[in-house]
Image (cartoon, coloured by chain):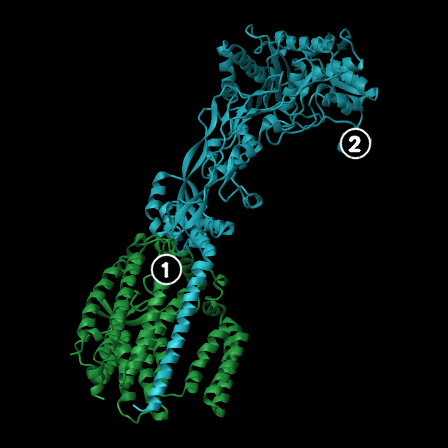
Chain colours: A green, B cyan
Amino acid sequence: MSNPREFNWVILTVWLLLTCIGLVAIYSATQGPVSEFLPAHIQSNFIKQLAFVVVSILVMLGVQFVSPRTFMQLSYVAYFIGIVLMVLTLIFGNEINGAKSWFRIGPFGFQSSEFMKIATILAVANYLTSRRNISVENIRYALISVLIIIIPTGLVIAQNDFGTAIIFIALIPVMLFWSGLPYGVSLFIVSPAIILYLTVLNWQLGLLSAVVLTGIVFFIQRRKWLTITSFITGILTVIGVRLALTEVLQPHQIARITAFTNPSYDPTGAGWNVIQAKTAIGSGGISGKGFLEGTQTQLRFLPEQWTDFVFCVIGEEFGFIGAGLVVILFMILFLRLLRIAGTHKHPFAQLVTVSVTAVYFIHFFINVGSATALLPVIGIPLPFISYGGSAFLTNTIMLAIILNMDFHKREFSIYR
Amino acid sequence: MDTRSSNRTRTSIRALQLIMLGLCLVVLGRVFYLQIIQYDTYSVLGEENSIRQEYVSPSRGLIFDRNGVLLVDNEPIFTITITPSKFDKEKIPLLASLMNVSDSVITERVNEAQRYSWYRNSPLLTDVDFETFSRVQENLWQLSGIGHEIGSKRHYPTDLQASHLFGYLREADRKEYEASDDLRLGDKIGKSGLELIYEDNLRGDLGVEFQRVNAYGQTIGEYEGERAGQNPLQGDNIITTIDAELQAYAEELMQGKTGAVIAMNPNNGEILAIVSSPNYDVRRLAGRLDRQYWADINSDTTRPLYNRAISSRQPPGSTFKPLMGMIGLHLGHVTEETIIANRGGYQRGRLYRDIAPLGDYDLEKAIAFSSNTYFYALMDKIASNGQFNTWSGLVKEFGLGVPNSIDLPSANQGIVPDSAFMDRWFGKRRWGLGDMINLGIGQGVLSVSPLQIAQMTSSIANGGYKIQPHIVHSVQRSDGTFEYTPIVYDPIDWVKDEYLEVVKNGMRRVVEEGSGRFYAKTDKVAIAGKTGTAENPHGYSHGWFTSFAPVDDPQIVITVFLENAGFASTSAAPIAALLHEKYLTGEVSRKFVYNYVMNWVPKEDNSQRSE
């Protein structure tokens, strides 16, 4: 057994702090004066979340006693069970908020796609690290890795849950990158997303980014065909986005996409969420309006304020002190987790840690980015803070696995 | 793990850490930007989001009589309101069934509110009964955008009808509220009577109130912050010159009759009572518009909305003779002693009939017994001497044929012709002496309103002064100060005391010896008056009686005009006499006259021109 001093107490503390902040925010968002305007099933969200937190703490503790090798051994089984659960959900599941991703067990709804995040990460990591000679530079291995991710992605899309699908898709470049995909190629893979985002903001900016990114790709890799492909892809992305925004899409679709930059275009429709979210955060000021005192929160101006816009509740009621603390806690979490990945000798542990960190980060960035109108509104919860039992449990299990592998590092490396 | 791989791991971790650190700083910067740099913008936005500015209607000014009797005040009504942006049109059937009206009524009102403002709270239905009000209130939770408020409507605490005097209010129409900053959809404004003329005084100023609202627009409570509301400024009160008791009595006497009564103080032009009959029920127009009733009074052939007291236009008939006599004296065509004999009429090209007793008439007697011959002859002289336009000018100085600026709407100017008018009316050179001679007895194209006759009579009674009839004595502003209606009291230059003496004596004798002796003569009050008949080509003649009392120190002028009344001496005169007695002695001694008036029915009049 390892020395408890070697346990990563910093990460555990950050996790506990985020969880507590989340409970406070959910309490305010569902139990405050606003509860008068909320249906009963939403008012009960706080209690349900509390129950999940208690369960999660037990799981967190329990996982620490498991041998790290178990995660490798269970990875394919978990993946298979996950796929089966998702298919079952698709057939028998309940539809909530338009997404058919819920599996009812008594009073609790369970989201199979959340569980699938862990299973997929473990499965890909196990596959890519099971033999010494596997490298993604070999196209066959790369394709199989992508396939392992694409299958659950397809199922998530079939469940109509695009937010979660983005997480899965984002895993592809991260995992490939970590497994040895050349930097230039990795950058090339993510570059369309960056160009797309910047083109929506401003097409000249998009064009500029396409040129600059191609330059960087060339500088890193110095491969002729890769550079040409990168350049053509970049230009095509800019042209495609321009065409979509001016010719192809209907005005209401354009409004939805561009609402985050120009919410006043449709202030009662697509722009409403953005305006209300920005107003909530902005009106918080330095120290906020006080617990249960936020007018945007308590008078029901914020949509989905216990999940997708929970950051606005914190921003409004606790101001920059509260919102800034949350961002800094996440920053500490990300940097610490990546540092752990660096200390691992075993590539499986490295890959799992990096992937989980990436999942957290993408959740964080998209959620807070949506709430602060840096990004279009994409319904994704904020890890450890947003209401959502399955998500909280899943995120905790992932963290518990990382902490376990870190804690049992030396024991783990023996099995290399 | 080989070195290459180890290096790559270190680089990759650095790269990922840099990317995440960078993006986290971007997020932190964004939060800083929103919360610290743009705080001023968003704190205002946030506040505005949750605060609704509501206008608070001021209470409309009150109307009092001359003795401080409250005539018009306000009473609370329940109003259902709507904010169209928050309202779901699929709820129209539900709302309609809760309110017991048809869907189309609600739809129409919703559309109107929508046209007015998408975001403002507008009245949907006003003056709903308490039961409906509570039913809607209980269901507000399923009717987003619907609200309620307590409004007010006019209330009339006395028994007075006085519909033409007070006037009614109606919701401002689209043109009106769009043209005004102070009016909102559903606000009522005066449409007739004092309510119209004194609209700007009575209405008051809108107040502003801030309320906390949630995202659904429901009011959560009073806003307690920095922004101060503003209390509405109550409308000005109006103190009229009306004597409520006299007005009530006049209304009672005019019941079932068609016509008008005006009682006025001849010394300052204060209207003491003004009645137009038939009238309408101003109480039924106070609340929510009763469409059926509104249609009824608009299509009623007796025209109850029409204010006969000031808008009616009729020949003055013999009531014109006293003024005519004074003009004769002034122009020197007759003196007090001039005798003109009545031999059954006046012969000039044709016979102008006169059914006054045959014999010799001086001016006083000609007025007392209403001899037409005297005034035909007089008018003939005026016309023959080319003084037609002079005559017209003199008549107009008594307020006839000129606009009257009484503080009620649609006062009629009437017609006092001059040659230019005759040219227009008949055509150039297509009118002659005959058309002018007729004017001498108040017939022909001459036409006046009862108010103008009362004004003319006042100028005779008060010793030759022009006065301005008015109804409002003063306006009491909400700060307690008063604004008084200026009194007009200008001498009419050409009128001399000796003219007035003859004329007044003649008018006194009308009541003592002439046609007025049957009902207008009473030893309680010394009344002087003059009857008159307005020829009516469509039926019974209209009857006039204009009078003042007491004869030596006139305090009141009463003019009565009855349509299709036949003999004015037996129809209009008794009403005037009762009112004189009532006003000057406080009671009516001759009950039989009262009973007579109350049971009076029109009869045909065969002696039209002799009165």
Regarding mark 2 in the picture, which secondary structure is present there? Answer: helix
Q: Are marks 1 and 2 on the same chain?
A: no
Q: Which residue is at the front of the view, A15 or A32?
A: A15
Q: Say whether marks 1 and 2 touch (CB < 8 Å).
A: no
Q: Which residue is at the front of the view, B367 or B136?
A: B136
Which percent across, then down, holds residue B533? 65, 20
For residue A4, what is the image quadrant?
Answer: bottom left
Residue at 44 percent across and 64 percent down: it is A270
Residue at 77 percent across and 27 percent down: it is B418
* Chain of residue at mark 2: B
**Outermost residue, right side:** B385
Regarding mark 1 in the picture, which secondary structure is present there? Answer: helix
* Number of other residues with Cα within 10 Å of mark 2, as a class: few under 14, some 14 to 19, many 20 or more: some
Asked whether residue B541 appears in the rendered view, the answer is: no
Residue type indicated by callout 2? Asp
Badge number at residue A321 = 1
The residue tagged 2 is: B423
* Chain of residue at mark 1: A
Above or below — where is B483 with respect to B373?
below
* Number of other residues with Cα within 10 Å of mark 1, as a class: few under 14, some 14 to 19, many 20 or more: some
Q: Which residue is at the front of the view, B403 or B290?
A: B403
Q: In the visual, does B161 lie left or right of B347? A: left
Q: In the visual, does B611 lie left or right of B39? A: right
Residue type indicated by callout 1? Ile
Q: In the visual, does A129 lie left or right of B566? A: left
Mark-to-mark CA distance, 1 and 2: 92 Å
- Quarter of the figure with the C terminus of chain B: top right
Asked whether residue B163 appears in the rendered view, the answer is: yes
Which percent across, then down, holds residue B327? 75, 16
